[in-house]
Amino acid sequence: MIKIEHVGLWTKDLEKMKDFYCRYFAATVSELYHNPKSGFSSYFLTFTDGARLELCHRPDIVEGSKDVFGFTHLAFSLGSKEEVDRLAYFFQDQGFPIQNGPRTTGDGYYEAVIFDPEGNQLELTV
């Protein structure tokens, strides 16, 4: 069964955004993930229905950069590493090149990344 696993959002102020969603939408928050090599930091917020929002921050993202503030990716949960691999290579064969992965990320996700026809980033994850 394929389901949307989470939606990612680039933020200017990670703590302020975390506090907003926790306060006004009753989200529970994960521990802060930080990758010192890339400068990437994120929180996963979980809402009462199980939906999740990943708040992302990287200091090199500023107005006018390649990555922009706002929604960054849509993640689909596929249920297994094998299914991630299968679908990633299927998309590649269909003309949608794998941008990253399949791999295990620093925060423990097994994922592959592709772009949809309009360049929106899609994460295929377990």
Image (cartoon, helix red, strand yellow):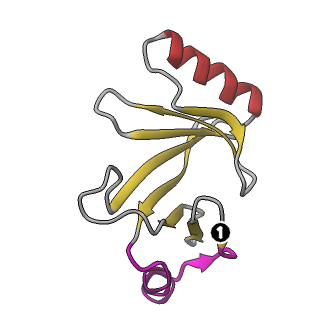
State the image coordinates of residue 121 (x, y, percent, origin top left). 42, 40
Asked if residue 62 lies left or right of residue 73, the reply is left
Asked if residue 78 lies left or right of residue 45, the reply is right
Residue, far top? 93
The image quadrant where one finds the N terminus is top right
Residue 73: say if magenta.
no
Which residue position holds label 1?
Answer: 34
Residue at point 52% right, 16% down?
Answer: 92
Q: Nearer the viewer, residue 20 or 98?
A: 98
* Stretch in magenta: 12-32
The image quadrant where one finds the C terminus is top right
Q: How many marks?
A: 1
Figure quadrant of residue 87: top right
Q: Nearer the viewer, residue 62 or 86?
A: 62
Residue at point 62% right, 77% down?
Answer: 29
- Residue 48 vertical position relative to residue 72 in the rendered view, above or below: below
